[in-house]
Image (tube, rainbow, N blue to C red):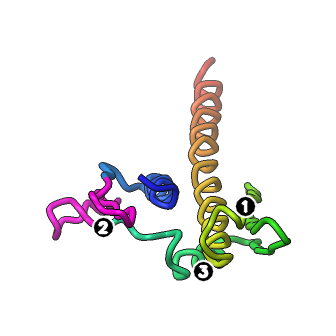
């Protein structure tokens, strides 16, 4: 599996996809079960190419309260911020075929990091609520 396929798989897992498997081709195509179950396609669908399509990177930039992208001579940077988390990542431009690809990859990696950070936060909040309930019900 190439590096873009790995990043796409990590982003898909953060978005609720399961049973992700690579298709035997050189392009890094992935199949998996989407969060809605893909009832019309026997539980399997093509995983979106998050790193290869500006639609996904653009949605990621617009979905957060703060977002920015910039470059310097060597790196492409992406910073995403919601009300609880801020993530800034950089991608070495030389590791990608184009500057465009480096920018999209930085954006998708930052979005994946924020999505993964929300899960532990939700778990911590549920645990705090459980403890508060226990304290309230204990005489």
Q: Residue furthest right?
A: 72
Residue at horizontal 63%, vertical 53%?
113
Which residue matches tag 3?
Answer: 58
The tag on residue 46 is 2
Q: Nearer the viewer, residue 24 or 56?
A: 24
The quarter holding residue 40 reads bottom left
Marks 1, 2: nearer the viewer: 1
Q: Which is nearer the N-term, disc 3 or disc 1?
A: 3
Q: Which residues are magenta?
A: 22-46
Q: Is residue 67 depicted above or below 119 in this figure? A: below
Give the mark nearest the N terminus, 1 or 2: 2
52 within the magenta span: no
| Real-space Cα separation, disc 1 to disc 2, in angstroms | 28 Å
Foreground tag (3 vs 1): 1
Q: Which residue is mark 1?
A: 92
Identify the image quadrant of the C terminus.
Answer: top right
Q: Position of residue 23 (x, y in %)?
A: 28, 58
Percent position of residue 18, x then y: 34, 51
Q: Secondary structure at mark 2?
A: strand
Depth order, front residue of 126/84: 84
Location of residue 24 in the rendering, given as x and y in whole percent from the top left corner = 27, 57
User: What is the CA distance from the residue labelled 3 to the residue labelled 2?
Assistant: 20 Å
Residue depicted at x 46% and y 56%? 2
For the residue labelled by badge 3, is the local secondary structure a helix, a strand or a loop? helix
Q: Secondary structure at mark 1?
A: strand
Left or right: where 23 falls relative to 106: left
């Amino acid at each position: 599996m190439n590096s873009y396929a790995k990043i796409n798989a990590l982003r898909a897992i953060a978005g609720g996809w399961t049973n992700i498997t690579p298709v035997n081709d050189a392009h890094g195509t992935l199949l998996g079960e989407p969060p809605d179950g893909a009832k019309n396609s026997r539980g399997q669908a093509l995983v979106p190419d998050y790193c290869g399509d500006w639609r996904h990177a653009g949605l990621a930039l617009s979905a957060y309260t703060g977002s920015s992208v910039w470059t310097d001579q060597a790196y492409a940077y992406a910073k995403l911020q919601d009300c609880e988390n801020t993530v800034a990542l950089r991608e070495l431009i030389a590791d990608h075929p184009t500057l465009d690809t480096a920018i999209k990859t930085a954006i998708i990696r930052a979005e994946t990091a924020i999505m993964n950070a929300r899960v532990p936060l939700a778990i911590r909040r549920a645990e705090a609520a459980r403890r508060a309930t226990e304290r309230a019900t204990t005489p």
